[in-house]
Image (cartoon, rainbow, N blue to C red):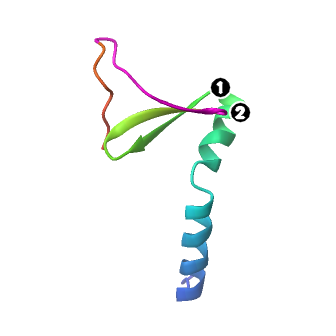
Amino acid sequence: MKLKPIQILLFSTLFLVGCGTISRGCAKYFGYDEVCVDGVKYIQFTSGASVKYNPDGSVATCR
């Protein structure tokens, strides 16, 4: 199935509008979700997010 430009635009718009919604939904069922933003790993909870730290106290990074 090949997507038309309008379908790609609609999908992209819905994805950006719903940014974080999927992670909050996962957090609702699993307690938390991990998200990578600009090379830093965050823990998403239903009520907010926090930077994830490594056991040595440094900030957890990701690709």
Tell me the quarter of the image containing the N terminus: bottom right
Vertical comparison of 20 with 3: above or below? above
Name the mark on residue 39.
none
Residue 4, given in percent of the width and then of the height, sits at: 56, 88
For residue 31, the mark is 1
Residue 23 quadrant: top right
Q: In this picture, which residue range is highlighted in magenta?
A: 46-56
* Residue that appears at 34% across and 37% down: 40
Q: Going 58% across and 71% down the picture, which residue do you hit?
A: 13
Secondary structure predominantly adopted by residues drawn in magenta:
loop
- Quadrant of the drawing holding the C terminus: top left
**Residue 45 at what x, y percent from top left?**
61, 31
| Helix, strand or loop status at disc 2 | helix
Q: In this view, does 16 lie above or below 56?
A: below
Residue at the limit of the structure toward the top, as seen here: 56
**What percent of the width, then of the height, locates residue 5?**
52, 87
- Is residue 57 covered in magenta? no
Left or right, residue 13 beside residue 46: left
Residue 41 vs residue 58: left or right?
right
SS at mark 1? loop
Crowd class of label 1 (few under 14; some 14 to 19; many from 20; radius 10 Å): few
Q: Name the residue under label 2.
A: 28
Residue type, numbered disc 2: Lys
Q: How many labels does the image show?
A: 2
Q: In which quarter of the image is residue 10?
A: bottom right
Q: Which residue is drawn at 58% across and 48% down?
A: 20
